[in-house]
Image: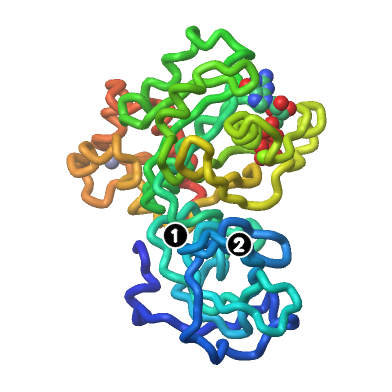
Amino acid sequence: MRNKQNFDEPKKEYIRKSKTFRKTLIKDVPKNINNFLQGRVIEVKPKYYVVEQLQTKSLYSCFVAGRISSPHKYSNLIACGDYVNFTIDDNSSNEQSGLIFQVEERKTKLSRRDPANPNREQVISSNNSHLLIFMSIDEPIINLRLIDRILVAAELGKLDPIICINKIDLVDFDEIFDMFDTYKALKIPFFPVSVAEELGLDFLYSFIKGKDIVIVGMSGVGKSSLINKIFGYEVQRIADVSEWSGKGRHTTSIVRRFELPFGGYLTDTPGLREFALWDVSKDELCLLFPDFRQYINDCKFAACTHTHEPGCSVKWAVEKNKISFERYQSYLNIYYTLND
Ligand SMILES: Nc1nc2c(ncn2[C@@H]2O[C@H](COP(=O)(O)OP(=O)(O)OP(=O)(O)O)[C@@H](O)[C@H]2O)c(=O)[nH]1
Ligand SMILES: [Mg+2]
Ligand SMILES: [Zn+2]
């Protein structure tokens, strides 16, 4: 059942010891807590966080206090986009250095199962309004299964999805436009572009303008290229195709939020190698496919899993092309990877 942990445990804030930075830090919640500052994490560096103070927009390099108050028990303590309370670190020689002692509840999130620890959630970015699913049509080849998987994550994380297909210069896009009819039917904003050849970018820019967006996709699809194109100079390093192809190496390795010159924000993330969903059960999966919802109550069996049962209304809708075959394949693909 969804959010099982919420039934077993009272919903409260708890103090958790930070393992990561314990050595370098003070041992307890700072004493001058009345003088705290409010900020938002805009960059997750390997050893510290860059926090932008909300009122002044000044930047602070922040560590985590030895004890930190956080409502997030199962995930990384701090993610890019988190709203935090911090104090200026008096012990530091660097004036712009701070200690985070409290993290606010995340209103939205892009998260997955932590690839390094299946019992934990990895929040990649938080408190964004939109999720820009960024794929290339080729090099690397488009992965419809991954789009659907990320769409489920968007539903779970309360993010509005946008789909952008890059590198259309490599194909005759008119020939394959039908491939994306499902997403248009789902009313998901859809943008075919070529960052390199500057095709379709104006439509994309006018849509993302003023929004708070996190971008996600496989390595090498051109996420950082898009950000560089928007800024007009290299703010993020990008790799040559020959550098990444075959080796699966990532060019972007940290999550970083950018304020866009035309208004709004875009958070760049490292390329995905895998994307396992966090906190979804088999029986709720069909509810996270909005195009299935109108059929699921008409199945012959109340506990229909929509995989093999006779009299399944979802399967009937697939046969009649009312639900796309590709979407149904994605459903099965995810269903069999989930725990009961
Ligand atoms: N043909 C073509 N190549 C592109 C286009 N956009 C980006 N590229 C190339 O794709 C390669 C990868 O681009 P990046 O921007 O580094 O990709 P990324 O998604 O940020 O990759 P990671 O940081 O590893 O996740 C670079 O060689 C870009 O020049 C495009 O529209 N068409
Ligand atoms: Mg990148
Ligand atoms: Zn069914």
- What amino acid type is highlighted by mark number 2? Leu
Mark 1 CB lies closer than 8 A to ligand 3: no
Q: Which mark is residue 208?
A: none
- What amino acid type is highlighted by mark number 1? Asp
Viewer-closest of 140 and 55: 55
Indicate which disc, 1 or 2, sits on the residue closer to the N terminus: 2
Viewer-closest of 297 and 229: 229
Total numbered circles: 2
Which of discs 1 and 2 lies nearer the camera? The answer is 2
Q: Is residue 12 left or right of residue 59?
A: left
| Label 2 element class | strand
Q: Do we see residue 126 in this rendering?
A: yes
State the scheme by which the image is colored: rainbow
Measured from the top left, where is residue 306 in percent x and y? Answer: 33, 41
The residue located at (46%, 83%) in the rendering is 14
Q: Which mark is residue 59?
A: 2
Marks 1 and 2, how far apart at CA: 34 Å
| Label 1 element class | loop
> Hey, which quadrant is residue 114 in on the image?
bottom right
The residue located at (55%, 41%) in the rendering is 216
Q: Is residue 232 above or below residue 263?
A: above
Measured from the top left, where is residue 38 in percent x and y? Answer: 48, 70
Q: Is residue 252 above or below residue 238?
A: below
Q: Do we see residue 139 in this rendering?
A: no
Measured from the top left, where is residue 283 in percent x and y? Answer: 34, 53
Location of the N terminus (image quadrant) = bottom left
Q: Is residue 254 left or right of residue 3?
A: right
Q: Which mark is residue 279?
A: 1
